[in-house]
Amino acid sequence: MTFGPSVSYVGKDLRRPECVLANRWGDIFCSHNGAGVMRICPDGRQFPLQDDTEFGGMPVVPNGIALRQDGSFLIANISDAGGLLELDADGVRPHPVSAGDDALPPVNFVYVDELGKTWVTVSSKLRPRSRAYRRDVKNGYVGLISSDNSFSVVLQGLHYTNELRPDYENGWLYIAETFGQKISRVRLDENGVHGEPEIFVQFGPGAFVDGIELDGAGGLYAACIVSSELYHVDADGKAELIVGERNDEWVATVEAALDNELMGREHFDALPTETLPNISSLAFIGEARDRIVCGNLLGTSLPVLDAPRSGPPPPYWDVTVPEFGWQLF
């Protein structure tokens, strides 16, 4: 049963649009399985920005995507080949940190902040990563890429690291820990992170937090897979359900699988919902950033709804992306 505001949709024939971004000009960009990134223009035209491609002998599976100030993209490749990739009009290629023999493991998320720092999350060191679908496996980590393209781990021991957001104004780095069903935070300033993470909000059964976005008031929004729910979390860590399509029977099935160490891809690749098919990320859209578009794991379009609280401009809000790729619609 769907609870919350009405939902509309944008885009069509999308392939695993897990991560979503938007800019001031009304362009929406989302992960597009195999090809990297799909562009959805305000007039409804769609452009896969590149053809289907491979890395490490396997099709690219873009999870997180990041938009850089020059209009190019970074792709967190979550296939078993792993690696961080770059995408622009010239094609898809390994980022320097993944160009050698020591390519990163499957990368979950990548983010370029307002200081120009590139953050990377790895959910687990285990391959295949499904071995980390456990309550007791906590080997995810957060890394930073320096200006000379060297990679360093800045946080580790995390419970399946997913999206993150730096909040320099309030001095926190927020991290979604999916199998911990929580959002953690650690002190942050322009020199880096300080101290150990603390729990900001602990969600209940079924709410596996995947994507997060700041609200500009010391809180954030959280998109949860399995429960297919979108929450707002205020500055004190109090979570409020905004919209959801929770199926209690399915949640019980997934929680039992997790308890019995039997969770696998089948618990994410099938879901008895229609409106919010495993929503996994969000971005603000509109000049006032008063609407939310949701990335998801299982849909072929992107759910859109009104935001109860408008959001701040992300670091890439004013970036213009040159028109390239080939027109699908």
Image (cartoon, rainbow, N blue to C red):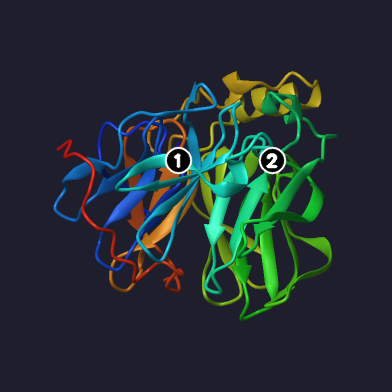
Badge 1 density bin: few <14, some 14–19, many ≥20, Cα 10 Å: some
Instruction: First in sequence, mark 2 or 1: give its number.
Output: 1
Report if residue 222 is visible in the image: no
Measured in 3D between alpha carbons, the distance from the residue under mark 2 to the one under mark 1, in whole angstroms, is 22 Å
| Residue at numbered disc 1 | 93
> Does residue 268 sit above or below 138 in this rendering?
above
> Residue at left 25%, top 36%?
12
> Can residue 324 be seen from the camera position used here?
yes
x and y percentages locating residue 220 in the rendered image: 57, 65
Name the image quarter holding residue 131.
top right
Q: What residue is rendered at 80% in x and 40% in y?
A: 139
Question: Residue 123's mark?
Answer: 2
What's the residue type where badge 2 is placed? Ser
The vertical placement of 28 against 49, above or below, is below
In the displayed structure, does residue 288 sit left or right of residue 325?
right
Residue 183: where, in percent of width, then height? Answer: 69, 55
The quarter of the displayed image where residue 38 is located = top left
- The residue that appears at 72% across and 76% down in the rendered structure is 191
Compare residues 238 and 129 and report the one nearer the observer.
129
State which quarter of the image contains the N terminus: top left
Query: 59 above or below 104?
Result: above
Q: Along the line of sight, which residue is nearer the eye, 184 or 126?
A: 126
Q: Residue at x 72, y 39 (%)?
A: 179
Q: Nearer the viewer, mark 2 or mark 1?
A: 1
Say which amino acid is labelled 1.
Answer: Arg
Near mark 2 (Cα within 10 A), the count class, few <14, some 14-19 or many ≥20, is many
Please tell me whether residue 227 is drawn above or below residue 65 in the rendered image.
above
Say what secondary structure mark 1 lies in: strand
